[in-house]
Image (cartoon, helix red, strand yellow):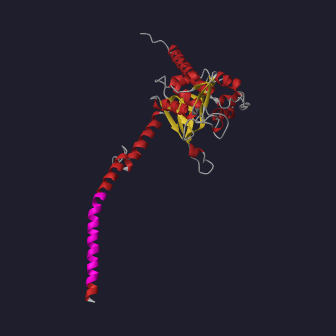
Amino acid sequence: MAASIASTFSGQAVRADARRSGSRRSAPRSGAFVVRAALEQQRMATPFDGFKFESIRESQISRAMTSRYFQDLHDHAEVDVVIVGAGSAGLSCAYELSKYPDIRVAIIEQGVAPGGGAWLGGQLFSAMCIRKPAHKLLDELEVAYDDEGTFVVVKHAALMTATLLSKVLAAPNIKLFNATAAEDLIVKQDKRGKYVAGAVTNWTLVSLNHDTQMCMDPNVIEAKVMVSSCGHDGPMGAAGVKRLAKLGMVEATPGMGALDMNSAEDAVVDRTREIVPGMVICGMEVAELDGCPRMGPTFGAMFMSGQKAAHVALNSLRRQQELEAAAKEGKQEEKPMVTA
């Protein structure tokens, strides 16, 4: 029995010694593994490993957003030009007006994402086709394209739209209010007749839920000129001309005609104009009012119509200044002369 116990302890000792011996032999291999792991980690490292943000309080973020937004509302309660709709025509109009830093501009866009239907080409394809000579705007914005002779192709519509949008947003004289709907027009009247004097606004989610909630009154943006670029008919499409028709300020809108690229684009640019005092239309809203054909997946007319609308708006501002100056002179002439 004693011999058996001694044999057992002796065997355990031998195995323990073997384990210690084996551990000493494998130590170099363990160290090599650690080195290899460290080298692998170093090889796979990125400049952002260990990245840490500055500490902040949640209330700081809230104040930073709200103070700026409500300051923007305060500063843009009255502007020179309000653009309703930030699709390809509206953004082109805003871009052209950005070249006139003394003109204060507000853009109202009912969607969260501005750009309208210009993020993709026809049938949800990527490429954007633009007929010449509208490609000159691409040259100005340094947007690359393939030249197909009478038209050019941008590899992705989003490239053009994102570039145009970035220029507009960076302009110091322009403010975009997206997720904001134009619910109505401000219409006033003087001895010359009725004229548009701004936009009635509300947050889009409120506008879409007037039927489900109690009355939620809107806000306003006064403007000397409104450019309506709400697109063709839809849930909020062609809103400007449809409202004018209900007010009896224009004839009923026939809606856009069937597709004909060649006649459609020329007609839309040609008929971009001030339809009533203080209101300019551009883009597919022109087609809705005048019954122009639609042009489908070619975007040159949208860009050119928007740029033309900017200059029509500038002409309207000049005319208003001249009328105000003439009115002041008339009042001065009416004053009786004071003799010594």
Pick out the residue farthest to the bottom.
1
Main SS class of the magenta portion in the image: helix
Q: Is residue 87 magenta?
A: no
Q: Is residue 209 above or below residue 237?
A: below
Q: Is residue 172 left or right of residue 57?
A: right
Q: Quadrant of the C terminus?
A: top left
In this rendered view, identify the residue nearer to me: 174 or 148.
148
Residue 16 included in the magenta stretch of the image: yes
Residue at (53%, 24%) from the top-left corner?
A: 96
At 50% from the left edge and 30% from the top edge, which residue is drawn? 168
Give above or below for 184 relative to 99. below
The magenta span reads: 6-30
Residue positioned 33% across, 55% down in the render: 33
The percent position of residue 338, horizontal first and vertical second, equals 45, 12
For image coordinates 29% across by 69% down, the residue present is 19
Left or right relative to 257: residue 72: left
- Left or right of 94? Residue 172 is left
Can I make out residue 7 in this image?
Answer: yes
Please tell me which residue lies in front, 22 or 71.
22
Q: Can you see residue 278?
A: no
- Residue 125 x %, y %: 63, 37
Name the quadrant of the N terminus: bottom left
Q: Residue furthest top?
A: 340
Question: Where in the figure is residue 196, as x and y percent of width and height?
Answer: 60, 29
> Height in image: 114 above or below 260?
below
